[in-house]
Image (cartoon, rainbow, N blue to C red):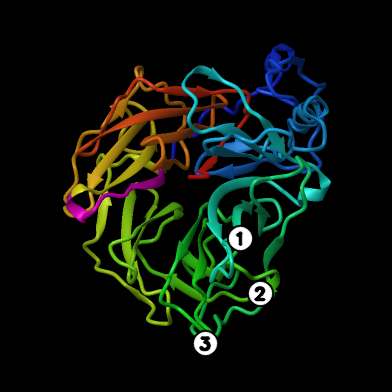
Amino acid sequence: MLVPTARTLGTALAAVLTLAVLPAAGRAAVPLQRAPFVPSTHAAATSFKGQHFVIGSAAGNAHAMQQQTGPNVFVWPSHGALFVADPSLNGVMVYDETHAGNNVLPYGILAGANTALDGPVALSVGSDLPCNSACTPYLYVSNAGNDTITYYTLPLTAWNQAPAGTISWNGNSTCQPYGQPGSPSPLSNPYGIVHQWFPGNSGQDPQGQIIETSETNVSGYWINVFNASNNGPTQCYEGLSAGWLDTPSGPSMYNQSPYWPIEFNANHDTVSAVSYAGNGGGWAWSPNNSWTVGPGACTEGTAVEQGSSSSNSYVWVTTNKGCGYTASDALWSCQIGAFPSCPSNPACTNPLAKLDFPDFPAISGLTNRLYVPNGNNGTVTAYALTGSGGAVCKPKSVYVNTQTPIGVAVEY
């Protein structure tokens, strides 16, 4: 893939950083000077599909934000939060997903030693299942630095909040309880997670599951599944390796029914679709169910615009300017009912879209917007969806003050 220029922090550190900090009702946002640069404790840069970052290279900025906000979360976005994973900050930014404008500021950042974050790159939101008297919502975070998935009770109550649980690997590559072979390293480079609910499951088949894509080639590339309520070293619940997987990342799910939802993910320059039973029935796929985007565009992530049927539902894809499609960073969409017979032209391109190495997107059913993190310029751009696989390509919102945003998730 095309290797972009790594985002440097030298001039950025001199800029003014502001937060949408409201420690008391009615108080205005307060300007905050950026903290001095704090070197990363990780000596080597991490590379993700041609994008390079050093975990914690801007940790001083995260610390400065928390000095401004204080340790506790006093104000939470009242209509829904937008979460942004940033490995350079080694934290997860929190914004209001409903805000519009060209300079949307964060409420604060989940970061610090208590969080156990280590290079957060991908996010998902889901609940503990089955729920008893009420469901507890969680923010799930995949960590590229230590190959874990940490999850946090929502809404956050502290900016240095400890995880409610941590999913790590116990070294056994056999998935349980059905004994299928799994990846020899299922959480290595976990560049993509999505929480999926299987309401009909019971007993040994979890209702809440985390589907994770690994960028590491270990006897092939893998999609791995974990019980979403696991805490501590564990084994996979399901695993899939296939020849059409190639550096898989940015998964998303289309719920065609309570059973056999379709998982989409970005590969090197394709998007694949595979049905997943979620109850020991395994995976079902067709070798034709792969869309060569562009053709030849460098695919990064996917998001599903869920409709009432496959004819009015769409999978959206982010691509960067590289591989065989060098015209522009771009956003693409395809009707799920027609997949993989998809358009050969993108839905949105630069300069209007203001994309700069777009990574793992998310779609909000609350706002009907597509949120796209731009890894090279430290922004998240949001686009109003118009139906029929279209979008207003001029951003509705531009969220600022991140460094290397890679993954996003929405609360609603």
Looking at marks 1 and 3 on the same chain, the residue that comes earlier in the sequence is marked by: 3
Q: Which mark is residue 234?
A: 2
Q: Alpha-carbon distance for marks 1 and 3?
A: 21 Å
**Residue 89 in sight from this viewpoint:** no
**Residue 304 in sight from this viewpoint:** yes
Q: Is residue 53 left or right of residue 366?
A: right
Q: Which mark is residue 188?
A: 1
Looking at marks 2 and 3 on the same chain, the residue that comes earlier in the sequence is marked by: 3
Q: Secondary structure at mark 3?
A: loop
Q: Is residue 359 left or right of residue 260?
A: right
Looking at marks 1 and 2 on the same chain, the residue that comes earlier in the sequence is marked by: 1
Residue type at tag 3: Gly
Q: Which residue is mark 3?
A: 179
Q: Residues within 10 Å of mark 2 (few under 14, many from 20)?
A: some
Residue 370 x %, y %: 39, 36
Is residue 171 in the magenta section? no
Residue type at tag 1: Ser
Foreground of the two, 226 or 95: 95
Residue in the picture at 57% in, 35% down: 78
Residue in the picture at 69% in, 40% down: 91
What is the magenta range?
300-311
